[in-house]
Amino acid sequence: MNCPFCGTGDTRVVNSRPSPAGDFVRRRRECQACAKRFTTVEYIEKVEMMVVKRNGEREPFQLQKIRVGLERAFEKRPVPPEAIDRVTREVEREVLQSADREVDSETIGRVILREIKKLDHVAYVRFASVYKQFHDLQDFNAEIQSLLKE
């Protein structure tokens, strides 16, 4: 790391502190040449993940889209916002671990359904009706019957 004051590459880390969420590390550094101190922030480099949709189109992975879908599914349900945050983080973690640079929307949907099912069956049926493209009441009934069997 080059010193921003004198440009020398000889610096040492004096202190390191991770962020409360653990998504970056703040490092206090000291230049060995001019003895001035400065702070750097270290983030994990995120790979640009692409989502392959059902129709074959590709688009960048957007966690906000997942969050909106979850909020819609859990609307007016007795589920705390922290639980929705946890599901969002779990989906992001699994998606980023599961693939190199591309993941299909089916995989994302299966992960979301699995996590929603743990929290609220009504929200599960709501989300499943869109994800599985229910066409009529029999589709809803079949999904509800599968939930009742578990």
Image (spheres, helix red, strand yellow):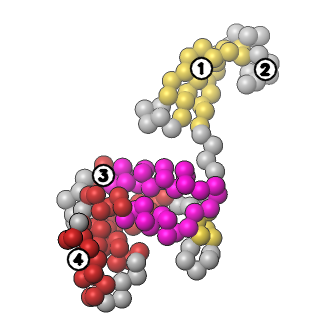
| Highlighted magenta segment, given as a residue range | 84-113
> Which quadrant of the structure image shows residue 146?
bottom left
Q: Which residue is mark 1?
A: 28
Circle 4/circle 1 CB separation < 8 Å: no
Cα gap from disc 3 to disc 4, whole angstroms: 25 Å
Cα gap from disc 2 to disc 3, whole angstroms: 45 Å
Quarter of the image with the C terminus is bottom left
Tell me the residue at 21%/63% (across/down): 77
Residue 12 position within the rendered picture, expressed as x and y whole percent measured from the top left: 68, 15
User: Dot 4 lies on which element?
Assistant: helix
Cα gap from disc 2 to disc 1, whole angstroms: 15 Å
First-in-chain label (3 vs 4): 3
Q: Which residue is mark 4?
A: 145
Which amino acid lies under the numbered mark 4 shown in the image of this protein? Gln
The one of 73 and 6 positioned closer to us in this rendering: 73
Q: Main secondary structure of the magenta part?
A: helix
First-in-chain label (4 vs 1): 1
Query: Is 102 placed left or right of 64 in the picture?
Result: right
Which amino acid lies under the numbered mark 1 shown in the image of this protein? Arg
Indicate which disc residue 50 carries. none
Tell me the residue at 26%/58% (across/down): 119
First-in-chain label (4 vs 2): 2
Which amino acid lies under the numbered mark 2 shown in the image of this protein? Gly
Q: Nearer the viewer, mark 4 or mark 1?
A: 4
Q: Which residue is mark 3?
A: 83
Q: Nearer the viewer, mark 2 or mark 3?
A: 3
